[in-house]
């Protein structure tokens, strides 16, 4: 079957890609992905104003899954290989179930600007899961920057507590948002590995479709027993997080990673929390304290340092990752393992 994806027909991919090897198209697609995701928290905040968190999660998964099924039929996609099925389901549990559910629960309790600050740890967490699941060896500078980011975040949350340093306990909103960030990092690490073999569009599409047997009945049950109060803003938020955040945004994001290199393009995500804070102020009228901008900038710088350290780190191929310089499989090779897998580039 012939399938057009948003990955180049034969691009040599390396997680250690240097600046000279990053294609302009990769930067453009990666930037579009970050821009699309930066609206997710404000849109989700609009949705949970009229729909409870569990119903929002189930609905966006089911509706996006139906869109993904239509897409796969339209492009006559081949079935994914058996070895990719478990990874696709695990990725879906991270970015289709975990992140939407936990972030929706968080946004019922905190504003989207605060959520964006916590989400600023996402690039570092994604790389951490790459190290844990794929055996990638990361330098001390990476871990130092990651630890510093956690300390900055905790210090900010302590400073905003009404009771100050004494008697401070994290609110459920903060904890839910952190779990959402962990879920997204896990999903990106696993889904990104599969995207190298079958393309970004098919990676997210198959994850959504494989979860349809769960998402459709849960969505129906949630609609029957959940809280739904539709307004124009609630519907607009729901449409955005379903069509863009859960589906089309991944086309651009994974396409950018495939073209420009995961580490290089991944650095673009450091600006996402700052964009989210701006959209929250413009669209929702949120007025966060001035320190939240300072914290966002500091976290962005620390994440940038961590990603720069990761860029220059040798990696060890294994079963979760495509060997360095393995080409993306497209065309008739999509949906099955590439014949070039494991070959070295010229």
Image (cartoon, helix red, strand yellow):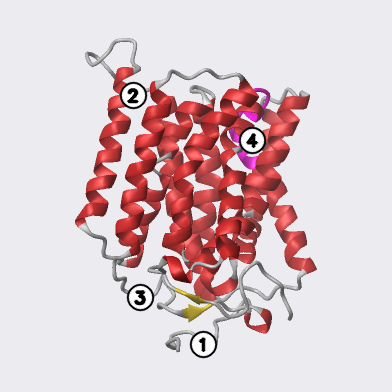
Under circle 3, the secondary element is loop
Q: Is residue 315 left or right of residue 5?
A: left
- The quarter of the image holding the C terminus is bottom left
User: Separation of disc 4 and disc 2 at Cα?
Assistant: 27 Å
Which labelled disc corresponds to residue 56? 4
The disc, 2 or 3, on the residue closer to the chain's N-terminal end is 2
Residue 223 in the image, given as x and y percentages of width and height: 71, 33
What is the number of the mark on residue 233?
A: none
Judge the density around disc 4: few (<14), some (14-19), many (≥20) Cα neighbours within 10 Å: many
Query: Does the magenta portion include 249?
Result: no
Which region of the structure is painted magenta? 47-59
Q: Which residue is mark 2?
A: 157
Q: Which residue is mark 1?
A: 340
Report the disc number at residue 317. Answer: 3
For the stretch drawn in magenta, the main secondary structure is: helix
Which is more N-terminal, label 2 or label 4? Answer: 4
């Amino acid at each position: 079957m012939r399938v057009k994806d948003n990955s180049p027909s034969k691009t040599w991919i390396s997680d250690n890609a240097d600046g000279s090897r990053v294609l302009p198209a990769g930067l453009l697609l990666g930037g579009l992905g970050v821009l699309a995701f930066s609206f997710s928290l404000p849109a989700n905040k609009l949705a949970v104003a009229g729909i409870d968190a569990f119903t929002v999660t189930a609905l966006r998964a089911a509706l996006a899954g139906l869109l993904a099924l239509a897409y796969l039929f339209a492009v006559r996609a081949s079935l994914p290989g058996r070895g990719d099925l478990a990874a696709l389901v695990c990725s879906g549990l991270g970015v289709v179930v975990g992140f939407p559910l936990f972030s929706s629960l968080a946004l019922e309790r905190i504003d989207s600007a605060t959520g964006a600050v916590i989400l600023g740890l996402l690039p570092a967490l994604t790389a951490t899961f790459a190290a844990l699941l794929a055996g990638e060896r990361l330098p001390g500078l990476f871990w130092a920057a990651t630890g510093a980011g956690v300390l900055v975040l905790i210090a900010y949350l302590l400073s905003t507590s009404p009771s100050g340093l004494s008697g401070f306990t994290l609110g459920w909103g903060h904890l839910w948002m952190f779990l959402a960030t962990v879920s997204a990092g896990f999903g990106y690490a696993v889904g990104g590995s599969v995207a190298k073999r079958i393309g970004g569009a098919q990676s997210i599409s198959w994850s959504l479709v494989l979860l349809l047997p769960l998402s459709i009945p849960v969505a129906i049950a949630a609609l029957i027993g959940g809280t739904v109060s539709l307004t124009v803003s609630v519907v607009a938020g729901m449409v955005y997080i379903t069509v863009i955040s859960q589906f089309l945004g991944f086309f651009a994001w994974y396409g950018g990673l495939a073209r420009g290199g995961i580490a290089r393009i991944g650095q673009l995500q450091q600006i996402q929390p700052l964009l989210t804070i701006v959209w929250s102020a413009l669209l929702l009228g949120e007025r966060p304290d001035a320190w939240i901008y300072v914290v966002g900038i500091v976290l962005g710088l620390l994440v940038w340092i961590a990603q720069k350290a990761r860029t220059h780190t040798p990696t060890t191929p294994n079963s979760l990752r495509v060997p360095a310089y393995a080409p993306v499989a497209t065309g008739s090779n999509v949906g099955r393992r590439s014949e070039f897998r494991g070959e070295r580039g010229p």
